[in-house]
Image (cartoon, grey):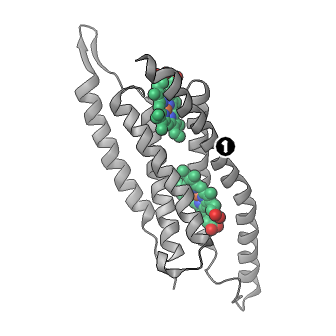
Amino acid sequence: MRARSHELIWALLLLLVIGGLYLLASLRQGLEISPEGLSLRLPEPGEPFGHSLGIIGLALMLFTEIGYSLRKRSASARWGRTRYWLQAHILSGVVGGFLVLLHTGGNFRGLAGLTALLTVMVVASGFVGRYLYTGIPRGAGEFEPADPRTAARNARLRRWLSVWHLFHVPLAAAMFTAALLHVIGALYFVLPLR
Ligand code: HEM
Ligand code: HEM
């Protein structure tokens, strides 16, 4: 029997909580009442609140990248089962990506905007990979099912998963490169001027 994965439910719950807190913070800081009506200013990415979202989001995405890859290559089971690390990968990837999007405050210009686009592409491609990955029964490589149609389906999914790796992994590398340049730019050119 296939074990159930609940990481997407947890991710959704966390997104709702984080989204709610973000909305409250935006209402406290940025709600303006004028004769023209109500307007809401989202937290700026360079202000302490918006800035912290970027830092925490990027830290979570670094964990997403490094944690699962290290566990996958480690033979030691003391680190916990690979399946749980993949669940943590998915959870922290979704939450980290969401935090980084909140950090942008809805601005998508230049290199920073490209970094945000790459973040969305990495997370979105992750969902495709998860669909392929969970479609393959674990151990299918060693124990092929007797039914040839099921065996062919598993082989097809494995092939697609390998092709998918060629998108997800380089996209992640491009995203971190763009993020590094953005952070260097922010630390050296933007923050010192404030
Ligand atoms: C993948 C992670 C990140 C993405 C996708 C991202 C994206 C963005 C975007 C789209 C903006 C708005 C740019 C604009 O207004 O023209 C921005 C601004 C900014 N980000 Fe990030 N960011 C990330 C991580 C970080 C981190 C870790 C820091 C910490 C140093 C940071 C510091 C800033 C600052 C200071 C600004 C304001 C720049 C300004 O006002 O000109 N960002 N970021
Ligand atoms: C910040 C976001 C993310 C980054 C940087 C990232 C990066 C990576 C990397 C580097 C790998 C290859 C691991 C290895 O083989 O060593 C990988 C695999 C994978 N990722 Fe992501 N990922 C992110 C988000 C996601 C999300 C949100 C999902 C699902 C919704 C996801 C699903 C997967 C799956 C299914 C695999 C393949 C597991 C395998 O074949 O062993 N990823 N990811």
- 4 horizontally vs 113: left or right: left
Question: Residue, x 48% and y 75% (percent of image)?
Answer: 79
143, 81: nearer the viewer: 81
Say which of 154 and 72 sits in front. Answer: 72
Compared with residue 58, is residue 147 higher up or lower down, i.e. above or below? Answer: below
**At x 70% / y 65%, what residue is drawn?**
161
> Three-letter amino acid code at disc 1?
Ala
In this rendering, does residue 165 appear at all? yes
Q: Is residue 138 above or below residue 129?
A: below
Furthest-top residue in view? 35
Where residue 140 sits: x, y (%)?
67, 83
Q: Residue shown at 74%/56% (left/top)?
A: 166
Q: Residue 73 at x, y = what percent? A: 62, 71
Q: Mark 1 Cα within 10 Å, few/some/many (few <14, many 20+)?
A: some
Q: Is residue 24 above or below residue 33?
A: below
Residue at image point 32% right, 37% down: 22
Residue 106 x/y as whole percent: 46, 28
Q: Quadrant of the C terminus?
A: top left
- Does residue 154 appear left or right of residue 59 in this picture? right
Per the image, the residue denoted by label 1 is 174
Mark 1: is the Cβ under 8 angstroms from ligand 2? no
Residue 55 x, y percent position in the rendering: 43, 40
Secondary-structure class at tag 1: helix
Asked which quadrant contains residue 157, the reply is bottom right
Is any atom of residue 132 visible in this view? no
Report the front residue among 111 and 163. 111
